[in-house]
Image (tube, helix red, strand yellow):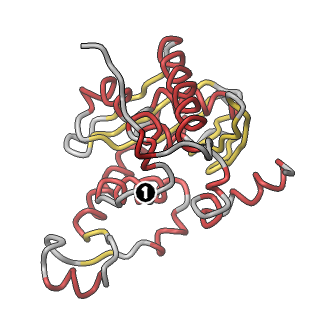
Amino acid sequence: MNIDKAIEKLRDDEHYYGDFGKKFLSNSDIKTLLDNPLEYGKPSERIPAFLVGGYFHTAILEPDKLKNFKIIEATTRNTKKYKELSEGEMCLLQHEADKTEELVDTVLANDYARALIRPVDFEYEKPAITELCGKLWKGKADIINHDDQLVVDLKTTADLERFRYSAKKYNYDSQAYIYRQLFGYDMIFIAICKKTKKIGIFDCSDQFYESGRDKVERAVEAYNLFVDDENFDPTNYFINETL
């Protein structure tokens, strides 16, 4: 495989999230491989929080692509109007889009956050590929901040005070480890609370990276055993723990 050509192809979201991108492992596979490897490769359910997060990222990094979001003027997704207009797709509600725009304005009004997001020398939505534990991994960085030599990742959260705990739950530690290997810079997270609009800027400790590396190693072990082994019989899958 020509890695440079593959990286260039991954710039297109259609390839990154489509069949071509599935040739590589990514941080989004960590949860499945660690929790239930039998579900690996199956499409994940789209939920409103992911849609809001995607709109938030796009509004800051690629506002020209906001036209790709279908927004419906309805109070909930249970209304007749929403069901008719959405045509079975997961769509943003107008009030969700409005609130997300407020989050975007809040983040960009903060001098410290804006300096990380809009440095002089930067790259947005940059893909990369690297080998970890004998497997090829892909990643696409929100922001490569060359001024400060940081990979900057944008997050929305329901509770900023618990972000350090949810960071482990949602595998931001493995993301930080993978992305540091991919791009050669330390990682920093900019999070904003969807309720209070408070902003948090979180750097990563050595222990956080080590936790991420451990998850990557265990995920590859699970992949090799339960996905890549053609002799594996899924009916024989079980977990083993000592109580």
Identified at 67% across, 53% down, the residue is: 23
**Looking at the image, which is closer to me, 172 or 122?**
172
Give the x, y percent position of residue 104. 38, 51
Q: Nearer the viewer, residue 2 or 4?
A: 2
Q: Is residue 129 left or right of residue 45?
A: right
Which residue is outermost to the right? Answer: 2
The residue positioned 34% from the left and 34% from the top of the image is: 199
- Within the image, what quadrant is residue 198 found in? top left
Viewer-side residue, 199 vs 10: 10
- Please identify the quarter of the rendering in which residue 78 is found: bottom left
Is any part of residue 173 visible from this angle?
A: yes
Element on which disc 1 rests: helix
Q: Is residue 131 left or right of residue 219?
A: right
Position of residue 209 measured from the top left corner of the image (x, y, whole percent): 53, 19
Q: Is residue 109 visible?
A: no
Identify the residue shown where x is 32% and y is 19%. 241
Amino acid tagged 1: Gly
Q: Residues within 10 Å of mark 1 (few under 14, many from 20)?
A: some
Quick one: quadrant of the C terminus?
A: top left
Q: Position of residue 168 (x, y in %)?
A: 38, 26
Q: Is residue 56 above or below residue 88?
A: above
Number of numbered discs: 1
Residue at 68% x, 30% y: name it.
132
- Say which residue label 1 marks: 54
Asked if residue 126 is positioned above or below residue 65 in the image, the reply reads: above
Q: Is residue 20 left or right of residue 200?
A: right
Q: Position of residue 138 (x, y in %)?
A: 65, 44
Observer-nearest residue: 160 or 11?
A: 11
